[in-house]
């Protein structure tokens, strides 16, 4: 079990990375929050959805002081935090989804449509080439291919990103392939939406207006199910708000406010 600690005890916030398999990609967010309260950065190593939920639950239990966390999940980490909060409500004081993917299959084509509109012709060709190679089960370079795809999509998903000062993250292609295929099936068969019906903590969605993941893919299914949530659209912002020049300050101000409101500092 791997957890990075930012700031001092007690640890009451958790910044959970995306991917799946992009361990370390939430390091900058965790470091920013460390000035507000002790923050953990759990690194997920399991290669199944259930395995990652169990792993995150144990990471939270072993890192806390018996009190619930403010769970802040980015991208895939948003879904993972929701699943963990639904299974272990005693571990979640609040749930904050940052740049989460849509909860229903019908919104998925919008992602690619928006992403392609941000690419040049050469980038579109590279995008489809990388996807084709990643889908080949014989590929022995999944981690490298996934890193290249992540860098390309990161460019499309950014509005005005600040210079990167964080260590590069090399994603685990095998974890990505296995976990995301399970998660995608959950989205398709309705099991993902069902997770949100089990939540017992306040839910906040923070989403960049330039993010290629459509925000209505979150807000509309939740409204249809009558699941209470708050939603804030971040202007001039892409998929990773803490790295965005124009949205960073507002984003971090909102997170600090939520942590204070939860009594976690």
Image: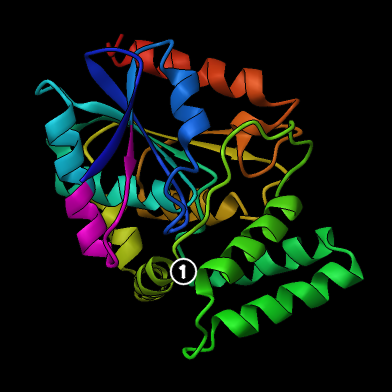
Image side of residue 184 versus residue 64, left or right: right
Mark 1 nearby-residue class (10 Å; few <14, some 14–19, many ≥20): many
Residue 32 percent across, percent down from the top left: 50, 20
Residue at 42 percent across and 58 percent down: it is 21
Look at the picture and state if 87 lies above or below 41.
below
Residue at 43 percent across and 73 percent down: it is 177
Work out whether residue 105 or residue 1 is closer to the camera in this orientation and state it: 1
Residue 242 appearing in the image: yes
For label 1, the SS is helix
Task: Please state the extent of the stretch shown in magenta in the rendering.
Answer: 41-55
Q: Which residue is mark 1?
A: 173
Residue 233 appearing in the image: no
Residue at 72 percent across and 60 percent down: it is 152
Residue 120 percent across, percent down from the top left: 89, 64
Q: Residue 247's image quarter?
A: top right
Q: Residue 189's image quarter?
A: bottom left
Residue at 46 percent across and 69 percent down: it is 173
> Is residue 144 within the magenta segment?
no
Work out whether residue 75 or residue 164 is closer to the camera in this orientation and state it: 164
């Amino acid at each position: 079990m791997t957890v990075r600690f930012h700031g001092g005890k007690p640890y009451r916030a958790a910044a959970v990375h995306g991917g799946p398999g992009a361990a370390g990609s939430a390091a900058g967010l965790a470091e920013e929050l460390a000035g507000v309260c002790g923050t953990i950065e759990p690194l997920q190593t399991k290669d199944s959805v259930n395995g990652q939920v169990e792993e995150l639950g144990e990471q939270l239990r072993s890192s806390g002081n018996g009190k619930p966390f403010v769970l802040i999940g980015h991208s895939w980490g948003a879904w993972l935090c929701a699943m963990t909060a639904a299974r272990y409500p005693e571990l979640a004081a609040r749930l904050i989804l940052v740049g989460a993917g849509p909860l229903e299959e019908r919104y998925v084509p919008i992602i690619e449509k928006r992403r392609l509109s941000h690419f040049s012709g050469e980038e579109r060709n590279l995008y489809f080439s990388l996807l084709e190679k990643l889908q080949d089960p014989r590929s022995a370079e999944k981690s490298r291919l996934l890193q290249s795809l992540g860098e390309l999509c990161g460019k499309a998903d950014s509005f005005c990103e600040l210079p990167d000062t964080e260590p590069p993250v090399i994603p685990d292609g095998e974890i990505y392939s296995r976990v995301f295929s399970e998660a995608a099936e959950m989205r398709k068969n309705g099991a993902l939406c069902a997770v949100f019906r089990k939540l017992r903590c306040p839910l906040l969605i923070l989403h960049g207006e330039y993010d290629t993941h459509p925000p209505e893919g979150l807000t509309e299914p939740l409204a249809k199910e009558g699941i209470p949530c708050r939603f804030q659209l971040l202007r001039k912002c892409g998929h990773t708000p803490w790295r965005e020049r124009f949205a960073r300050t507002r984003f971090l101000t909102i997170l600090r406010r939520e942590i204070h409101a939860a009594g976690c500092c």
